[in-house]
Amino acid sequence: MDWKTKEKIIKYILLFFALSSIFFLTGIVIVLFREGLPIFNKIGIIDFIFGKEWYPTYDPSSYGILSLIMGSLLVTFGAMVFSVPIGLASSVFISYILPKKLKTFVKPTIELLAGIPSVIYGLFGMKILGPFLKNVFGLPTGLTALTASIMLGIMALPTIISLSEDAITSIPKRYRDASLALGGTRWETISKVILPTASSGIVTAVILGMGRAIGETMTVLMVAGGAAAMPSSFLKPVRPMTATIAAEMGEAPVGSEHYQALFGIAIILFIITLSFNILADLASRRFKKKVSGQ
Amino acid sequence: MRKSLLIVLSALLVLTLATGVVGAQDNNLTIQGSSTVLPIAQKTAEVYMEKYDVNISVRGGGSGNGIAALIDGTTDIADASRFIKESEVKNAVDNGYYPVPHRVAMDGIAVVINPSNPVENLTLDQLQQIYTGEITNWSELGGADKEIVVVSRDSSSGTFEVFNEIAVGGKRVTPNALLQASNGAIKSVVSDTEGAIGYVGLGYLDDTLKAVKVNGVAPTNNTVASGEFPIARPLFMFTDRWPEGLTLRFINFVKSAEGQKIIEEQGFVPLF
């Protein structure tokens, strides 16, 4: 075999592997829509998304997922309220204030947080944070949207810190030098020059963190409480979409309306995370353009 | 030459397949149906397969699916957590199948509260009002002035199905109920939450939970087996006609002292 054929074979093998993840993605999307779309025909997409009652196994059944969507959005919003300030402050601190020697130690440690299995976060939320919040607020149960928000916030931190730190570090040094040379203090440099320049990079980090939070399943299944009522406060239990799918899919008869409805929820979730990713991508493109000096 | 070889080969193939099928009939057993009965079927099948050289495949999918499979002739045993419906019997007979029920165990569901809660007894009526959200405070039931935290299984579980039918009268459980995905999760929430009420299979009772009397009857193996405890039901395995061969031997094993002991270990109430 001469080197040309070898080269060709290697090329096609690599091409095959490179395309495989696209095949998997297409496969998943096809299955998702094939199993889930029928429910939109049966119930009507408006009634499915905006219906407030989720009673899949009763006769007559109701397949309204608004309270589940609101549950997901509420805990994701809460997670961001918790993790964005902490994440932002940490990333500024790591990139500008922390000595380089310590940075090589601190950043990997934070990234280690991302490697902890979500069931462990769930256990922590269920057995430690939940009972603690219950006592602090005098609640009937500690499994609430707030508990889930804090846990998801902690889980989104590594994404947010790591990506915004990258964004801040990639700002050319001349920006900082110029600001300091003009007599700006360190704080003025950070708040008026660095953060505005890095803003779209930080937005990317936050959106990806949101994607992490809204798609998280095990933790919310364990700590959010699981009440399918319309969420009225952070101190009440909620039932996010992911938890519903995970709890009910195992015993829903294959091909039944309930099964299709769970896939329907998955479609909605897929669309939400997909749009998060597209937004993050747009923001990161803007950021690259800005830093490269247009 | 080539053609004759082909014929011989295909004849051989057909023969092997045929003997495979014939041989398989006495060694293979398929069980399908209720997910409530699934742990019973699974565990007894495992033990049985260890003792004898047979192959038993067990699947869940729900009582309805199991009985439908029996009527289609695609399963030897249909597990069911309810009795067969009249329409299903008619359908079976029309297809030339005669379903025979075998009661293999009893399933009791205990209503549990936090051990710190002084309430001792609840009626089925009160349970219905609690689970539909009409009663929301323990003081209405003779307890402390505390909000009731309603805990329920997720609505596709078999335990939910029975509890909802017997204790909640088939009505819709309040959307404020915390839905938990397993008996273990319910146990964990109820033992951590002073105002909680939940329900678990009899096998899950221990010191961390307090089982209340329902209509004045405490949930024990005896009261469930005798039918006094109201939230209980028999579990069935259905066969086509009176079983023979491996099917008969397996059902006899499930109903034997050893099989019933396995059933008790799985958290169900044995027949004797």
Image (cartoon, coloured by chain):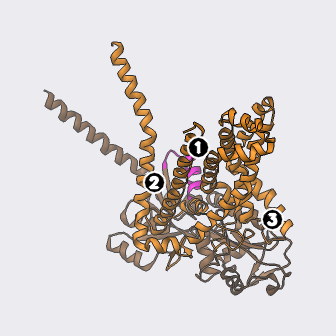
Chain colours: A orange, B brown
Q: Which mark is residue A287?
A: 1
Is residue A272 visible to the viewer in this orientation of the structure? yes
Can residue B189 be found in the magenta stretch? no
What whole-number distance in Å separates the C-alpha atoms at marks 2 and 1? 63 Å
Q: Chain of mark 2?
A: B
Whether labels 2 and 3 belong to a single chain: the reply is yes
- In this picture, residue A180 sits left or right of residue A57: right
* Label 1: how many Cα within 10 Å (few below 14, some 14–19, many 20+): many
Q: Name the one closer to the observer, A56 or B244.
A: A56
Q: Residue at x 73, y 43 (%)?
A: A91
- Structural distance between the alpha carbons of marks 1 and 3: 48 Å
Q: Is residue B50 magenta?
A: yes
Q: Residue A131 occupies which quadrant of the picture?
A: bottom right
Q: Residues within 10 Å of mark 3 (few under 14, many from 20)?
A: many
Q: Position of residue A287 (x, y in %)?
A: 58, 43
The Cα atoms of the two marked residues, 2 and 3, are separated by 43 Å
Q: Quarter holding the N terminus of chain B?
A: top left
Discs 2, 1: same chain: no
Which element type, helix, strand or loop, lies under badge 1? Answer: helix
Expressed as whole percent of the image width and height from the top left, the position of residue B199 reads 70, 71
Q: Earlier in the sequence, mark 2 or mark 3?
A: 2
